[in-house]
Image: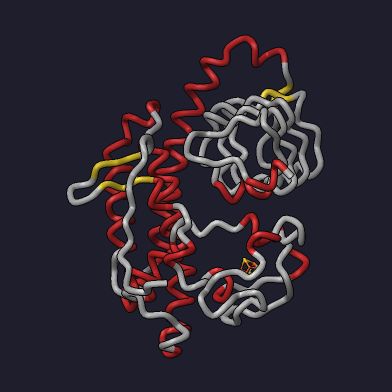
Amino acid sequence: MNMQTKIHCKPKAGYEIAAPERVISRSCLKPDCGQCFGLCCVALYFSAGEGFPVDKEAGKPCIHLQPDFRCRVHDQLADKALKGCLTFDCFGAGQKVSQVTFKGKDWLQAPAYAVPMFDAFSIMRQLHEMLWLLIEALALPSAGPIHGGIHSLLIETENLTFLGAEAVLTLDLAAHREKVSRILLEASELERTNVRSSAGSSAARKKVLRPGADWIGADLRKYDLRGISLRGACLIAADLRGADLTGTDLIGADLRDADLCGTNLTKSLFLTQAQINGAKGDIDTRLPDSLETPAHWNN
Ligand code: SF4
């Protein structure tokens, strides 16, 4: 692997926002493992109980990580039931830290970079996730009145991702996250209000779910979930088969093993690839354009 290769990020159609100097696209927020120094397989703490190969400390390489930063068992992750590996999504932070923040110097050849690189990866992942969500917020028609504020925050967030290592490591991430969370909530409320009023009388035929509760293993098919907030809800193994999640805010919702067979998620709000990767689905599950059907759904 050529460690000095620059990142080429070709935007795809949809979810592209023109900034003054460049195009910010969700296609830039997809992992490119060939340009990453195996950061997720080293930097993070993980445990066998969460679907990783072994219990390991943060900063220690996984037993399956090879010296070329490739995974030895990449083709067998599903067979080995390594769900943690299958579901993890770095939002493209791995290649950004490897090739931009640290300019192609890897932690194996330059061990002094290891700790700052791993710490920067954790910060960058959060920034890239914010970009993912802000891009979506900017595409919501109902959020028109606040598009200016979303756009400014998107540019500000993207600029943070191009800072040098020292600046990244000393960012006030909590303060920035607070600003982003506030505007995402506003955008969500605008969109959900619109969806609920469009849903009209058909919503009355189904029960309304009270947001904020845990729904582990619950059968949610009898509820009208359109336009409601399931932010941070625990939906582990919930039955959502055939549900219409139009305008449903799923930011931070735990969808591990939730059954999404036949579920319509095309216009759900703030859904990520990691959430989808951890859920169950089938060919009738309808996803937003920017998300991909996980390969292991077909197994
Ligand atoms: S099994 Fe492969 S993908 Fe999973 S942590 Fe180890 S090296 Fe990374």
Q: Position of residue 145 (x, y in %)?
A: 31, 30
30 w.r.t. 121: above or below: above
Q: Residue at 28% across / 59% down in the picture?
A: 159
Marker count (numbered): 0
Q: Is residue 213 visible?
A: no
Q: Position of residue 124 (x, y in %)?
A: 42, 65
> Is residue 40 toward the left or the right of residue 95 in the image?
right
Q: Residue at 38% across / 35% down in the picture?
A: 14
> Is residue 217 toward the left or the right of residue 161 in the image?
right
Q: Position of residue 54 (x, y in %)?
A: 73, 74
Q: Quadrant of ligand 1?
A: bottom right
> Could you say which is closer to the camera, residue 169 or residue 256?
256
Task: State how the image is colored.
Answer: secondary structure
Q: Residue at 73% across / 76% down in the picture?
A: 55
165 w.r.t. 222: above or below: below
> Could you say which is closer to the camera, residue 77 or residue 286?
77
Q: Is residue 285 visible?
A: yes
79 w.r.t. 26: above or below: below
Q: Residue at 41% across / 88% down in the picture?
A: 110
> Is residue 239 toward the left or the right of residue 292 in the image?
right
Q: Position of residue 46 (x, y in %)?
A: 67, 71
> Could you say which is closer to the camera, residue 29 or residue 172?
29
Q: Quadrant of residue 93?
A: bottom left
> Is residue 159 toward the left or the right of residue 132 in the image?
left
Position of the C terminus by quadrant:
top right
Position of the N terminus by quadrant:
bottom left
